[in-house]
Image: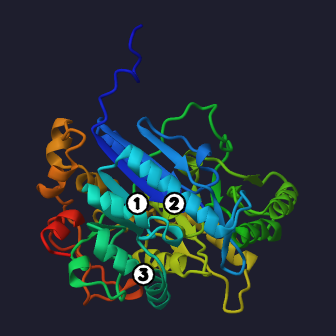
């Protein structure tokens, strides 16, 4: 039988596993997916496996040599606690099941590089045994965090409660911040040691290139100019959708057309009510639940009105679209901090309710109209703003292997751990204790690159802790 294109693929010599706990929304999965697919595209001998708790992971496309394992879902309750999503098991039993799946995947897949998204110990410490096993194996372990986590006081309390600093000191070789210090230095004020701070790398934001899908795939954009209103996952998107619809309801002359994407997690009763309101607007508003290929709509939109999540912000920058960001302010200040920084740098406009929490439809209508004349983000973007994937590829893949397309044979993890560290990505600024955090971060040029730290296993073997 003739070999197919898949049969003829290069043997897999590098393996990367990405952990994404995904208890809410789409952000962690989409970020992990973008990184996995960027790495696989850069190295024909690399395979990436994503561990995710997202209930809709199967609705996304995954590139060749990228796949996912779905962990049993958990959901955050209104009181801030968590529960099993579908299984109906006690939470502790669900966590034990998730931890066992993670351990089995790590043992069977045997990644050379483990990238943990945000939660150093994993959800409810479910990564603890896997971190120990991966470290003993000589795997390189990286903590990846978005550009903004939360306001400093709340974040410090959370990290102390969860013991993240202990996990980082014990197991992690580097911390990659998927942003720029001009926007935020998210790890300031957390009491990290000088040794840990020296391992922090700012990569820049993750560019999101839109694939070339056939015209019949995905949602078809309107034939007329339109603005795109996006809530991200939609679980907390009620305020934005209501405000946008109110603007069109209050002003019958408001143009252009609006396409509202609710997000897959918007409550069904809210979606039904919003559908009725949109249908009554005489064809000026189109509303859809979810499109996993929303990049096409982003590319064709005149401008974007959106919440301030990390992935949405990356997409706004990547499409270079004038944008109005309407950030969530509870339970975290993450989106507000990001939107304030973006507005300060001239990358986007920020819109929030007034001091009494009122959302004036006329204010939203003016912001929608203003998108036509608002500068694009590229007019104000700092150097390297969208170099995140390129930087991650340089950090993750040893330069000798990336140049030749070859890699050390499987089973050589111990030798790799003791050998030279991968070449650092250029223009990555180290975190500095003497620089203020998010709300006052100066727009200083990045410092000279630092060499990547040796793997934690090698440091421990040498007595370095």
Secondary-structure class at tag 2: helix
Q: Residues within 10 Å of mark 3 (few under 14, many from 20)?
A: some
Residue at label 1?
130
Image marks 1 and 2: residues in contact by CB distance under 8 Å: yes
The N terminus: image quadrant:
top left
Question: Residue 125 placed where, x, y %?
Answer: 48, 71
Question: Residue 152 placed where, x, y %?
Answer: 44, 88
Q: CA distance from mark 1 to mark 2?
A: 8 Å
Between 169 and 355, which is closer to the camera in this rendering? Answer: 169
Q: Is residue 24 left or right of residue 28?
A: right
Q: Is residue 199 left or right of residue 177?
A: left
Residue at label 2?
99
Image marks 3 and 1: residues in contact by CB distance under 8 Å: no
Let me know if residue 319 appears in the view: no
Q: Is residue 362 left or right of residue 432?
A: right
Q: Residues within 10 Å of mark 2 (few under 14, many from 20)?
A: many
Q: Is residue 140 above or below residue 179?
A: above
In the image, what residue occupies the spot 14% across and 70% down?
Answer: 448
Earlier sequence position, callout 1 versus callout 2:
2
In the image, what residue occupies the spot 19% across and 70% down?
Answer: 460
């Amino acid at each position: 039988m003739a070999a197919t294109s898949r049969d003829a693929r290069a043997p897999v010599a590098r393996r990367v596993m990405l952990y994404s706990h995904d208890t809410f929304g789409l952000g962690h999965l989409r970020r992990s997916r973008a990184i996995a697919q960027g790495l696989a595209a850069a190295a024909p001998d690399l395979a990436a496996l994503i561990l995710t708790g997202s209930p809709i992971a199967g609705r996304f496309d995954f590139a060749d040599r990228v796949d996912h394992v779905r962990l049993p879902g958990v959901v955050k309750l209104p009181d801030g606690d968590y529960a099993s999503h579908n299984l109906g098991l006690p939470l502790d039993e669900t966590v034990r099941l998730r931890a066992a799946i993670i351990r089995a995947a790590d043992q069977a897949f045997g990644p050379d590089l483990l990238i943990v998204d945000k939660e150093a110990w994993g959800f409810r410490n479910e990564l603890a045994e896997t971190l120990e096993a991966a470290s003993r194996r000589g795997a390189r372990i990286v903590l990846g965090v978005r550009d903004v986590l939360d306001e400093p006081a709340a974040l410090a309390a959370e990290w102390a409660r969860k013991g993240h600093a202990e996990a980082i000191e014990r197991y992690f070789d580097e911390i990659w911040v998927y942003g720029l210090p001009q926007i935020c230095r998210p790890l300031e004020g957390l009491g990290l040691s000088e040794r840990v701070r020296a391992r922090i790398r700012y990569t820049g934001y993750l560019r999101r290139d839109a694939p070339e899908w056939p015209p019949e795939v995905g949602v078809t954009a309107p034939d007329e100019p339109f603005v795109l209103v996006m809530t991200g996952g939609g679980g907390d998107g009620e305020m934005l959708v209501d405000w946008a619809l109110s603007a069109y309801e209050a002003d019958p002359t408001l143009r252009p057309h609006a396409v509202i994407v609710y997000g897959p997690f918007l409550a069904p009763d809210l979606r039904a009510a919003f559908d009725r309101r949109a249908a009554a607007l005489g064809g000026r508003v189109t509303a859809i639940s979810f499109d996993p290929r929303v990049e096409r709509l982003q590319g064709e939109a005149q401008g974007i009105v959106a919440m301030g999540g990390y992935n949405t912000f990356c997409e706004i920058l990547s499409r270079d679209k004038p944008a109005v960001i309407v950030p969530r302010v509870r339970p975290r200040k993450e989106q507000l901090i990001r939107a304030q920084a973006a507005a300060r740098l001239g990358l986007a406009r920020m819109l929030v309710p007034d001091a009494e929490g009122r959302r004036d439809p006329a204010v939203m209508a003016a912001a929608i109209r203003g998108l036509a004349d608002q500068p694009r983000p590229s007019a104000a973007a700092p150097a390297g703003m969208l170099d995140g994937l390129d930087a991650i590829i340089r950090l993750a893949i040893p330069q000798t292997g990336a140049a030749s397309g070859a890699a050390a044979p499987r089973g050589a993890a111990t030798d790799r751990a003791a050998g030279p560290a991968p070449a650092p990505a250029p223009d990555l600024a180290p975190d500095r204790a003497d620089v203020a955090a998010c709300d006052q971060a100066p727009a200083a040029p990045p410092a000279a690159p630092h060499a990547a730290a040796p793997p934690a296993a090698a440091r421990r073997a040498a007595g370095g802790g």
